[in-house]
């Protein structure tokens, strides 16, 4: 089968849009982490700085999967690996 | 790209790495890109700062002046961070972690000054990840010997060895990709805002700069150094 490059570019754009749906997971995860951190600060306000830094570290690590989706989208849109 | 989009002032969206000039080396074309130039600027700034600190510290006074105070504060904070997570191994790694921390931090926030952040190039972050990997590997072999290394590979049972090897190799890749993708996403966001909304991008992008360049950059720097320290500490302690 022979596709012209516009068709491939359009499909790449759809794929990029689908790839960034990966952002849902980290969003939910970061929200849960922040919620638990808020609860922890409420229980023990003295440990606020420790809790905040732990929360930020965990959130930044959890963010990685979403960023992989973003990278796939970037590759599809700008590097165009599917074009012949 | 970009024609026919509302509010676009005709400015092009530009966040790619550009080649500045090329030369031939052993029959291959090698490009000097904007990343090289930005990294050079960052290094020059850091070197100038280092020389200034050294000059001040030669005539260090009991009651510190402003600049001496700033330098002491930076060193104290870095030392505190490294000691908090590495404990008794901190002394050996304080130099490396401190250097990497300052370099990544200045690289990440250089987007504020109109540079393209050098860390938004996978060719910069991957070597950083590989350096972490080398440190982990070297310290594991040094402190746990070959027997401990093999024992660590066959952790629950020997049949898990391939999975453990994949897990070890994934460390530098995930470390470098995390830093790269975070900085790249900030760069792309700012480029999109300045490119697509160039007519109304007057003052409010400053708030986004604070988030994407300062906050995100600082967090990712902290995360990179923290994970490096944790991994290396684990490799030493076993």
Image: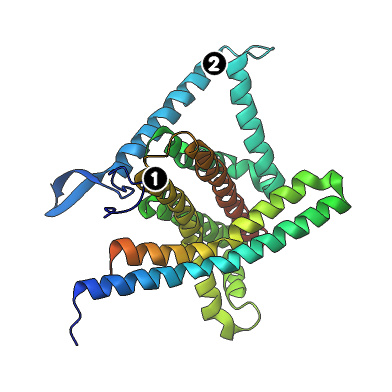
Q: At 63% across and 57% down in the image, what residue appears? A: A59
Relative to B91, residue B137 above or below: below
Give the secondary structure at mark 2: helix
Parent chain of label 1: B
Residue B146 percent location from the top left of the image: 56, 68
* Occupied quadrant, residue A79: bottom left
Q: Residue at x 82, y 56 (%)?
A: A39
Residue A83 shows up from this direction:
no
Disc 1: CA contacts within 10 A as few (<14), some (14-19) or many (>=20): some
| A44 shown above or below B169 | above
| Numbered circle sitting on residue B56 | 2
- In this orientation, which residue lies closer to the viewer: B200 or B222? B200
Split into 4 quadrants, where in the image is the N terminus of chain B?
bottom left
Q: Nearer the viewer, mark 1 or mark 2?
A: 1
The coloring applied to the image is rainbow
What's the residue at 34%, 48% (across, down)? B15
List the residue tagged with mark 1: B197
């Amino acid at each position: 089968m022979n596709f012209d490059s516009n068709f491939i570019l359009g499909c790449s754009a759809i794929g990029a849009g689908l790839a960034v749906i990966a952002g849902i997971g980290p969003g939910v995860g970061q929200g849960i982490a922040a919620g638990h951190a808020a609860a922890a600060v409420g229980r023990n306000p003295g440990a606020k700085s420790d809790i905040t830094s732990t929360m930020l570290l965990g959130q930044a690590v959890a963010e990685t999967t979403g960023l992989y989706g973003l990278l796939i989208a970037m590759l599809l849109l700008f590097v165009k690996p599917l074009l012949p | 790209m970009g024609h026919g989009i509302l509010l676009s002032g005709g400015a092009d969206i530009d966040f790619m790495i550009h080649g500045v000039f090329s030369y031939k080396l052993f029959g291959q074309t090698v490009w000097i890109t904007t990343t090289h130039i930005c990294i050079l600027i960052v290094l020059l700034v850091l070197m100038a700062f280092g020389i200034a600190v050294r000059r001040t510290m030669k005539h260090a006074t009991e009651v510190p002046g402003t600049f001496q105070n700033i330098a002491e504060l930076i060193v104290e904070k870095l030392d505190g961070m490294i000691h908090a997570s590495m404990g008794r191994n901190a002394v050996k790694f304080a130099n490396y972690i401190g250097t990497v921390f300052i370099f990544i931090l200045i690289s990440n926030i250089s987007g504020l000054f109109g540079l393209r952040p050098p860390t938004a190039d996978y060719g910069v972050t991957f070597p950083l990840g590989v350096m972490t990997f080398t440190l982990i590997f070297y310290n594991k072999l040094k402190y746990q010997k070959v027997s401990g290394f093999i024992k660590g590979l066959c952790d629950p049972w020997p049949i898990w060895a391939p999975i453990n090897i994949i897990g070890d190799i994934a460390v530098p890749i995930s470390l470098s990709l995390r830093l790269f993708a975070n900085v790249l996403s900030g760069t792309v966001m700012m480029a999109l805002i300045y490119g697509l909304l160039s007519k109304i991008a007057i003052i409010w992008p400053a708030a986004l700069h604070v988030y994407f360049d300062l906050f995100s950059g600082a967090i990712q720097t902290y995360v990179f150094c923290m994970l490096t320290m944790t991994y290396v500490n684990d490799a030493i302690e076993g």
